[in-house]
Image (cartoon, rainbow, N blue to C red):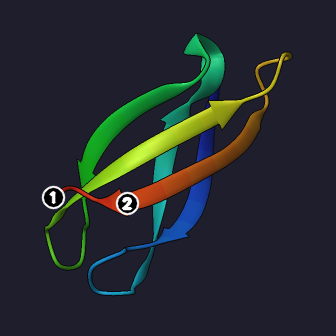
Amino acid sequence: MLDSITLRCPFCGERFEATVDSSAGDSEYIEDCPVCCRPINLHLRTGAGGDVEGLDADRDE
């Protein structure tokens, strides 16, 4: 299931929307900030029913 989540870039602080696929459960991936183009580590947490519980954004360092 695809969900759109608004989050804040850990580098430039700008808000942007990320599309995540919660059908595979918890996952980690890297997505570039659409504003400053720096790589962001995204950590997707899902619940038992496949619902998104949270999306954390950390610097890729």
Residue 26 in the image, given as x and y percentages of width and height: 58, 24
Give left or right: position of 19 versus 22.
Answer: left
Residue 58 in the image, given as x and y percentages of width and height: 37, 60
Q: Secondary structure beneath disc 1?
A: loop
Residue 61 bears which disc, if any? 1
Is 30 above or below relative to 16?
Answer: above
Name the image quarter holding the C terminus.
bottom left
Is 13 above or below relative to 30?
Answer: below
Is 37 above or below relative to 56?
Answer: below
Is 2 above or below relative to 56?
Answer: above
Mark 2, Cα crowd under 10 Å, few <14 / some 14-19 / many 20+, is some
**Residue occupying the far front of the picture:** 61
Q: Secondary structure beneath disc 2?
A: strand
Residue 7 in the image, given as x and y percentages of width and height: 53, 68
Give left or right: position of 26 versus 40.
Answer: right
Residue 36 in the image, given as x and y percentages of width and height: 17, 78
Q: Which residue lies at the image location 86% right of the left edge and 17% below the top edge?
A: 49
The image quadrant that residue 60 belongs to is: bottom left
Name the image quarter holding the N terminus.
top right
Mark 1, Cα crowd under 10 Å, few <14 / some 14-19 / many 20+, is few
Q: Nearer the viewer, residue 59 or 17?
A: 59
Q: CA distance from mark 2 to mark 1?
A: 9 Å
Query: Which residue type carries mark 1?
Result: Glu
Q: Which residue is mark 2?
A: 58
Residue 7 bears which disc, if any? none
